[in-house]
Amino acid sequence: MAFTIHLAGDESIEEGDSYLPFNLVLVDPVTKIVKGLRMVTVSPDFRSRLAELIRKQAAEPFDTMAYYQAIGSLYDQYPSASDLLKQAVIVEQGGKTLPAL
């Protein structure tokens, strides 16, 4: 999912040795009806990598239009989830970090 810390208000993620919970919301794109809610966790390794990337992102200047254009370009370049997965920095399944593809 596309994310920038610049649009997340005062949110932050600190490095730590505990699992990080995420709330996932599945929304039907046509009806806008919420179809599912689930909390998942990611490992401390994932949490540390995410915290590092967010710190770097927060230090960079932000342009809203450029952000949305970049997202559109990436979705054009990688139209399926499996295409994006091949480019992943870190992959987890069931709270366990998997080897890079």
Image (cartoon, grey):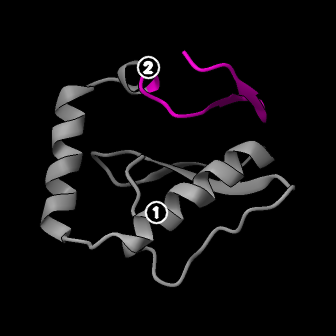
Q: Is residue 26 above or below residue 80?
A: below
Helix or strand or loop: what does disc 2 sit on? loop
Give the amino acid type for the residue marked by disc 2 in the picture: Lys
Residues packed near mark 2 inside 10 Å, few (<14), some (14 to 19) or many (20 plus): few
Is 54 left or right of 6, judged from the image as shown?
right
In reply to whether residue 93 is colored magenta, the answer given is: yes
- The location of residue 60, given as percent across then percent down, is 33, 69
Q: Amino acid at mark 1?
A: Lys
Residue 51 position, x and y percent, is 61, 60
| Residue at numbered disc 1 | 56
Q: Can residue 69 be seen in this snapshot?
A: yes
Please tell me whether residue 73 belongs to the stretch shown in magenta: no
Horizontal side, residue 12 vs residue 76: left or right: right
Say above or below: 78 vs 13: above
What count of labels does the image hold?
2
Which residue is drawn at the image coordinates 59% and 33% (left, top)?
Answer: 90
Q: Which residues are magenta?
A: 85-101
Mark closest to the chain's N terminus, 2 or 1: 1
- Give residue 4's position: percent from left, percent from top: 39, 63
Residue at position x 75%, y 56% in the image: 20
The residue lying furthest to the bottom in this view is 10
Which residue appears at 52% of the width and 67% of the height? 55
Res. 90 mark: none
Circle 1 packing at 10 Å, graded few (<14), some (14-19), many (20+), is: few
Q: Is residue 11 above or below residue 40?
A: below
- Residue 38 visible (yes or no): no
Query: Where is residue 95, by image quadrant?
Result: top right
In x, y percent, where is residue 44?
79, 48
Which residue is labeled 2 in the image?
86
